Image (cartoon, rainbow, N blue to C red):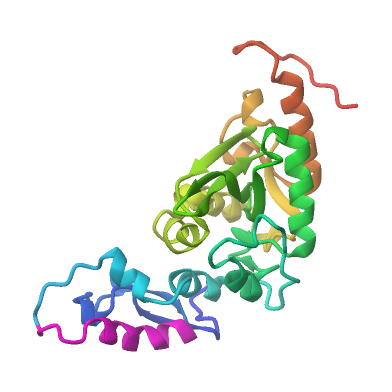
Amino acid sequence: MGGTVPSRADVDHTIDLQLRGLDDIANMSLLDLSTNRSLGSQITWQLRGVEPGTCVIISDDLLRGLRMFDRFRAQYAPLRDTVSGGSTWQHERLAGVDGYSDLASEFAGVTFAGGLYRVHDEQSGARALTLIAEALPEFTARACPFGYDWLGRQFAVDSGRVAGGQPQVLLLEPGTGEALEVPLHFAGFHDEELIEYADAALATGFFDAWSAANGDSLPLGRNQSVGYRVPLFLGGHDTVENLELSDLEVYWSICGELRQGVRSLPPGTSINEVAMR
C-alpha cells in the first residue's frame, strides 16, 4: 500500500474496543469507510442490555447480526483496483444463491489487490463456464463460476453439493487439474473463508512472493492469470520460479488439453515430451 490510506478506507481497530480489543497497532487494519463507520453502532445495538465488564464471546449469531458481506466489504473494498465494474453475470444456477445478486450488483467485474481475487461479470463468467466445460468436463453440469483468483483458479457454486438449501463452493484448479470442495455456501465463502483463511483460499503468501519480483505486471488484466510453466499434474514444482504471466483462456485451454492427454496414464508414468496440436 506504500503507507497511504485509500480514499474509500479507514484505519481502525480490527476487534472493536467495545469488544475489549486492544488499542494497539497490532489490532489495526484497513476497513471500508462506510462499513467501518456503521459497525460501531451495530455492535452497540447487539450488546444492548449487557452489563459493563461482561465477558462477551463473539459467536456466529452475533456475526450474523451484522449485514451480509460486511466483513468481505470491510477487508476487500479498500483493495479494489477497478472502480467501475461490469454487468452482473447471470445464470440459472446462480439465481437462487443467497446473497449473490447483492454482492454481484456491487462488485461484478471488480478486481481486488492487484488481481488476487476477482468477481465475474457477464463476459468473464460466460467465458469461464466454457473453459470449465472444456478442461474439466465432469463438472459441466454442476459448477457455475462466480469469481477467480490470480492463479486463474475458478470459484464456483456446486449444484451437486447442497447443504441447508444452498449450493456449496467448488474450487477448480487448471494447474493441478483438480477440483477442491469447499464446505461453505456463497456468503460464507466471502464472509468467512476469504477473511479468516485468505492464504488457504487465495494463496496470498505465494502471491506476495511472486508480486515482489513482478510488481510491474500488476494489476493483472481481467484476461490474465499467473500460471505454472509446467503444470503440477505433469510434475511441475509449486514454486515462484515455475510461474509466468499468462493469458487466462490460453492457460486453461493448454492445461485442459494436457490433462485430457494424461488422464488414462498409470500414476508415475514418465513423460518425456509434450506436443500441442
| Residue 247 visible | no
Q: Residue 260's spot in the image, x, y percent?
A: 75, 25
Q: Residue 10's spot in the image, x, y percent?
A: 44, 83
Q: What residue do we see at 53% from left, 39% from top?
A: 180
- Image: 71 above or below 182: below
Is residue 4 left or right of 47 when viewed as pictured? right
Q: What residue do we see at 23% from left, 75% from top?
A: 21
Residue 36 counted in the magenta span = yes
Is residue 25 left or right of 118 when viewed as pictured? left
Q: Within the image, what quadrant is residue 109 found in?
A: bottom right
Is residue 208 left or right of 195 when viewed as pictured? right
Out of 20 and 69, give the one closest to the viewer: 69
The residue range painted magenta reads 33-52
Q: From this viewpoint, which residue is outermost toward the front?
A: 165
Q: Residue 92's spot in the image, x, y percent?
A: 70, 57
| Residue 213 visible | yes
- Image: 48 above or below 156: below
Which quadrant: the C terminus? top right
Out of 240 and 18, give the one closest to the viewer: 18
Residue 132 counted in the magenta span = no
Q: Residue 210's spot in the image, x, y percent?
A: 59, 49
**What secondary structure do most residues of the magenta stretch adopt?**
helix
- Image: 46 above or below 138: below
Q: What residue do we see at 65% from left, 74% from top?
A: 105
Out of 123 and 238, give the one closest to the viewer: 123
